[in-house]
Image (tube, rainbow, N blue to C red):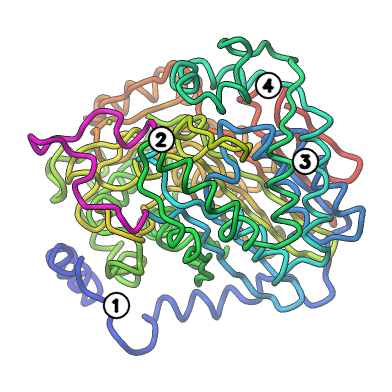
Amino acid sequence: MNLRALFATWLLVLAAPLQALSPPPGPPAAGAEVAVAVARPLRPAPGEHPAQPAIASANAYATDAGMEVLAAGGNAFDAAIAVSAVLGLVEPESSGLGGGGFLLLHVAADDRDVFVDARERAPLAAQRDMFLGADGEAVPRRSIDGALAAAIPGMPAALDHVARHYGRLPLARSLAPAIRLAREGWRFGPKNHAMIGFRRDVLARSPAAAALFLRDGDVPAPGTLMRNEDYARTLEALAADGAAGFYRGDFAARLVAGVRAAGGIWSERDLAEYAVIEREPIRIRHRGFEIVTAPPPSSGGITLAAILNILDGYDLPALAEADRIHLTVEAMRRAARDRATRMGDPDFVDVPVRLLTSPDYAAGLRAGIHPQRATPSELLPGVDPGRGRPDTSHFSIIDAEGNLAAVTQTVNLPYGNALVVPGTGFLLNNEMDDFSVKPGVPNAFGLVGDEANAVAPGKRPLSSMTPTFLFGPDRVGVLGTPGGSRISTMVLIGLLAMMDGQGAQAAVASPRFHHQYLPDRLQVEPEALGPAVRADLAARGHTVTVAAEPWGNMQAVLWRRDLGTVEAGTDPRWRGVGKASAGDATIYR
């Protein structure tokens, strides 16, 4: 055994005790140094710009709003504000002012990447066991429905922050399309209709929510004209006073009073103390590409790094399909195990980022993969022994200067906690369910967690949202998706497709499969794998479960530097909703 293999095996044995350690002091690991040094030439040269801008989002109204702001002289960051605000209006099941998100930005003039963490925070009155009953067991739906489920929103602060630090236009101009649309009206779409059905009864419990989203207590028919004057006024306050118009003063007092009247625990101090955090992104080197993605409190970037580092040990494109899927699934399994046991808010727990993203650590994990047999998850040390809906939203933007924005935003489950404070015009989130309410107890997406992601005052819950950039010698990609626990594996599949030379639309349409450690099953989309491949994987010990429906709603843009063209792709899994625009080329889905 050579020294590298011996060291990798030693790391694998010692990994569990290391989970609580801080990253060691000193320079980055050698692998990390090489990744940054080699990846730099992959970036566009100064003065190298796309021929035109491109936007892909989950709703045509939002894509049009972003294009309007670009045409008015805005950059990708101004357009991101416009797209975000419109999505919060026309796609309330997925995101909005009452939620949060992650914004990954690339500033072309400085060749700089920044990750804006606008994740929601637990109220200061939150307690570790607040969702447990007297018997010590989790109370069903307490962390999902109603005011107690809501964490402090981050998106309003993010819009103000991006406008002040990265945008070119006044915040009022970027918010203008959403304000106008809220007053003039928008048409209730097929996705709105599909997602509202199983939340109708909960929405009906909130008179303000019912007034906004139901018609005579029932689900609006597709095509119904919807208006939201309260939303317009809230955006106007944000435009006039910035974040202070939301987090302080009369509006904040009204918001807190409404939450507390409904049984919540917010305070005005919670709102006044909220601030976005700029963090350093995760950087990954794979197959000659640089991937820039989300750091904690997202689990997505570390998960991607772990999977890709494991796969670096194989010539994946040269393998037969069943071998390729088997090895990828085994990498997913191990990365998801580390998510469950080691990740949380980095301001509260020591997440061993350098260990988990180390090529040597990945080599140790790879050593435990049998090329022909699945490893039962119960044999991997971790937590004791869960579903993903498109109840988050993602959009991708590139402007004519080469600025990039990958933004994933959410209210967690469809229509959040189904509560609207009267006069505000938006739903609140139920992000408290993204904490580990009790070690080993699955959340609504079937994800288990441990103490690293336990509820604590002021803490941000772990998230799967994974906005991502891809930099290569011939292409620059921007992508992301909703999908709960399946987000990081969907982004992985999209990235691999782009690295294989596929275009933006082909990447977002790629068939999907997923493994998340627990429950121990390989989930595949209905058309993802052929019968022979499924049978082969089952023979290796995988429990293959074919989903009833496809999942996700990926949005991507791609700058083909070699051809001088720009593409945009919108997920075909939702028909008649998303829109991808790149100059004269427009794709509706």
Highlighted magenta segment, given as a residue range: 123-146
Q: CA distance from mark 1 to mark 2?
A: 42 Å
Front label number (3 vs 4): 3
In the image, is 551 to the left or to the right of 148?
right
Occupied quadrant, residue 297: bottom left
Name the residue that disc number 1 marks: 23
Residue 407, how many percent across, how many down? 61, 52
Which is nearer the eye, 266 or 410? 266
Which is nearer the eye, 324 or 296? 296
N-terminal of the pair, mark 3 or mark 2, is: 3
Front label number (3 vs 1): 3
Front label number (3 vs 2): 2
N-terminal of the pair, mark 1 or mark 2, is: 1
Task: State the quadrant of the N terminus.
Answer: bottom left
Residue in the image at 70% along x and 26% along y: 577
Q: CA distance from mark 2 to mark 4?
A: 37 Å
Q: CA distance from mark 3 to mark 1?
A: 41 Å
- Element under disc 1: loop
Name the residue that disc number 2 marks: 262
In the image, is 40 to the left or to the right of 524?
right
Q: Report if residue 311 is visible in the image.
A: no
Which numbered circle lies on residue 63? Answer: 3
Secondary structure mostly seen in magenta is loop
- Element under disc 4: loop
Q: Which residue type carries mark 1?
A: Pro
Residue 273, how many percent across, how many down? 47, 66
Q: CA distance from mark 3 to mark 4?
A: 16 Å
Residue 466, how many percent across, how many down? 50, 51
Residue in the image at 49% along x and 58% along y: 271
Name the residue that disc number 4 marks: 575
Which is nearer the eye, 300 or 46? 300
